[in-house]
Image (cartoon, grey):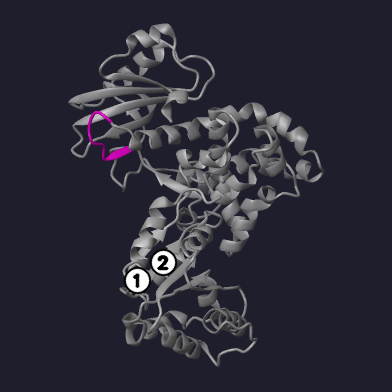
Amino acid sequence: MFIGRERELGTLERHYGSGIFELFCIYGRRRVGKTELIKEFIKGKKTIFFTGVEDTKNVNLADFSSAVLETLHNTKSKAVYADFREAFADIHEYAKNERFVLVIDEFPYLAKSYPGISSLLQIEIDHRLKDTGIFIILCGSSMSFMENQVMGLKSPLYGRRTGQIKALSFDYETSKKFCVEGTEEEKATVYGVTGGIARYLQLFSNSRSLEENIKSNFFNSDELLFEEPMNLLNQELREPALYNSIITAVATGCTKVHEIENYTRLDSSTCVKYLKNLIELGIIRREIPVREKATSKKSIYRLDDGMFRFWYRFVYKNISKIGLGLGGQVYEEVKGQIPGFMGEVFEQICKEYMWKSKLPFSVSEIGRWWGNNPIRKAEQEIDLIAVNSNNSKAIFCECKWRNEKTPESVIGELINKAEMFGYKEKHYYFFSKGGFTEAARKSAGENIRLIEFSDMF
């Protein structure tokens, strides 16, 4: 069953309905569901579907020839076009009279084996294909390649695309549709440990309990997720060991550049360059306190991928034991720490909830805040702050992923923290998995909202 991507599918269908030439770029990290999106879109449509491989130009040409010949000539002939130019000449002849889709999946692999493919495509589009009804999709997992060498200003294809889709991980509301069974808390945990990545969500069977799913997928050396982060690093990066050391540093609490440098023994310029690459892959994010400028020196680095965050916290340091078949024992040792892991996940769920909710005013930014409280002369943090465009109104949020009820003291503490901010209008939202004490409920009012997790979605 295909889940989610309604907006993306709608965009593709709308452009397909134009009947004129279209060139779409679809990109995003591995396993996010790009190919499944394309397969759903091309149902019932005549399509040449080709997937580039990490091999020679001749191997890719042979595969491309097979795909074209089978679709346009209804033959499984092993014949091979003399070159890609001849293949596109044949495609052009059919595109003059018939609308069909040409999908080149893993386009970066094809471009690696044949660097001239982008220039050839540009020539074909400018001189022939732009006057036909062909719908071309270029898809790739290398986000830096797709953004810079396909859509970038210096790319031969710059200005030719008619649309682009960056496939992101699913939010909680979509992710939980993969989980037919289980409580809301269990569905949130699945979202947390998979990071909302489509392929990983599919690995969690509805016929097994949450505990069985986590043990089977992460703490079993025979399963995909046991080695997934290392496999992804090996596929995407030239020096996976160095990148692994940076991710390990961030996962163990080194969030500032100098802390990461000290942990990895890398010089500053190298460290920053590698961090930038990990940000492009969607593994790490650079975060600044809400209201701060993009150049703020208060920036920190955190793992942005939920599966990576879970894996590096619970699996990486136990690889040897799991490899010996002791995954069940390891899980028993770490399962008590999973609720603590879910704290950051819950903040993300609350953030998603706020973007989709009717708030007291229009919000332009939602994010965490940390810094010095000049009133208390101490470093403090606020889980989330939502602000309007002219910084005159704000909603301060506390997110508690705990079984016990949230007490009234938490409300007073957040209100006290908010005193350091000079907003004209202030509101307070409290999110709690375990609910609220009676005293806390009595504190609720026009500008104080108490929201239980079970009521959020």
Instruction: Tell me whether circle 2 and circle 1 mark residues in contact (CB < 8 Å).
Output: yes
Q: Is residue 26 above or below residue 132?
A: above
Front residue of this view, candidates 82 and 278: 82
Please state, as top left, top right, bottom left or bottom right, where the C terminus lies in the image: top left
Q: Which residues are magenta?
A: 359-366
Q: Residue furthest right?
A: 324
Q: What residue does disc 2 label? A: 25
| 210 relative position to 221: left or right | left
Q: Is residue 323 left or right of residue 335?
A: right
Q: Which mark is residue 161?
A: 1
Q: Is residue 217 magenta?
A: no
55 above or below 2?
A: below
Residue at image coords 30%, 73%:
159
- What secondary structure predominates along the stretch shown in magenta? loop
Closer-to-camera residue (263/255)? 255
At label 1, the amino acid type is Arg
Q: Position of residue 28 (x, y in %)?
A: 47, 58
The residue at the point 31 percent across, 82 percent down is 131
Kind of element beneath mark 1: loop
Crowd tier of the residue under label 2, counting other residues whose Cα lies within 10 Å: few below 14, some 14–19, many 20 or above: many
